[in-house]
Image (cartoon, rainbow, N blue to C red):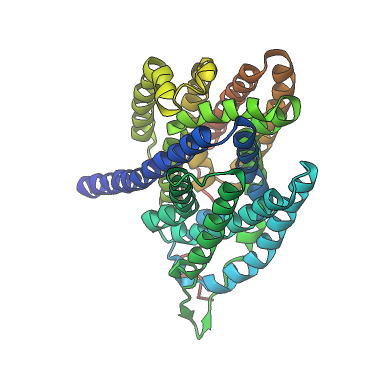
Amino acid sequence: MASQTMLRRAGVSLRVGNVFVVIVLGALLQVVTQIVLARGLPKADVGLISLIVGALPLLSTLTLLGQDTSIVRHLSPRDADRYDLGAYARRTLGIVVPLGATAGFAAGLYYAFPGLPMATIVTLVASQNVVLLLTAFLRARHRYEAAIVARHLPIIGGAIGLAVLFWTSRLSLNTALITLLAAYGLSALIAAALPGHRSSIVGSGERTPVPPHVLRDGFLFLGLGVSLSVMVSIDRLIISRLMTLPDLAVYSTIFAVTKAFDFLFYAVGYVLMPTIGRRGTMSLRRPALAVAAVAVVVAAGYLLFGDELVHLLYAGRYDLGTYLIPAFVLSGVLKLFYSIPSSYINGGAPTGAVRRFMVANLFTMALNVALDIILVRRMGLMGAALATAAAWAMRLAAGVVIMQMYKGRTNSERVPDDPGGP
């Protein structure tokens, strides 16, 4: 038994490590993208692209209806291949893709985007919905490495395309937007061709449909996802309204340097959440200690060498924004610790815990928006960075409290052992 436990722990660590390798590569490519844009375009153009990309998480989350998380929560505890995944994928795509395109169009109208930026934001949101939904089926089947590679296809394609444009001296606002549009659109087509969402097993003479509570519970995760996406996006959206696009370019460019915390956060949650869902419960002491150790090392690196890194990457063009690094580091550390209670509650805690978590996070989201507006008006870019850090602190505190309230209790709506039976 002890040896089996050690093997399971080693397996989780290996899967997290594999996912993290892909995420690190994606992070490097995102840094390459930001370097290319920052060096090759005026700050106003960098600000416009940052606005489009910054709005993407919120618009996509609003229109995915929580299905990407609900699929992983409910199908990962048992063999997802028992279900008619293809039918469920087609049904949900028929809803979330038009919703995504509509949300992108509405955002473009709000910001008065002309033709090409409008087409870009519409395509990016619709394509992102396709990629996130379909890779959720891969995660539910515990194919984490394939899922994370597919998830990063838009980043890979965009980085390569923009780098080619930069080195051939053909980079402009229009060519950059066309490249992003093509990268996201092609990634959606590739995701649609993956086999991970098409499996179906014949049980009792019929295909087993995906349980209806997968769709229903998605709305719980919609609230959680919206609260998270608002925290990720709201600072840039408010800066774009209360300040200028060049200011947004400075903020986004400095933040891009500190995104190692984001990638660590996603790496932990990407594997830990479905693992908890499959087991029902597990000790979180080792993951918490590992997160603490990594947080200390990464934070120290940024605080000691962040200024030099910004100067090196952007050839001195964005040195005026390095004062934001400590605030971004604080947010990153809090976010990294938040991955533990978030994975536990979303992955295996009872539905009541998820509901409380959603309410708490929607409350912190509202406070975050209010803090952003107040502090940006008073302190400029530093105000936005501090408002985000404060919101992550509140979100982490809520997660820890709810996790302790439901410690040892598991989701009562876990998928039955034999979904095809009577």
Whole-percent x and y of residue 252? 57, 30
Q: Residue at x 46, y 73 (%)?
A: 199
Identify whether 388 is placed above or below 11: above
Whole-percent x and y of residue 269? 45, 42
Is residue 266 at all visible to an observer of this figure? Answer: yes
- Going by the image, does 329 lie left or right of 98? left
Q: Residue at x 50, y 86 (%)?
A: 205
In depth, the one of 394 and 258 nearer the eye is 258
Q: Residue at x 67, y 17 (%)?
A: 380
Image quadrant in which you'd find residue 96: bottom right
Q: Quadrant of the C terminus?
A: bottom right
Whole-percent x and y of residue 178? 59, 53
Extreme-bottom residue of the structure: 205
In depth, the one of 241 and 360 nearer the eye is 241
Whole-percent x and y of residue 349? 53, 44
Identify whether 307 is placed above or below 193: above
In depth, the one of 154 and 310 nearer the eye is 310
- Going by the image, does 379 lie left or right of 260? right
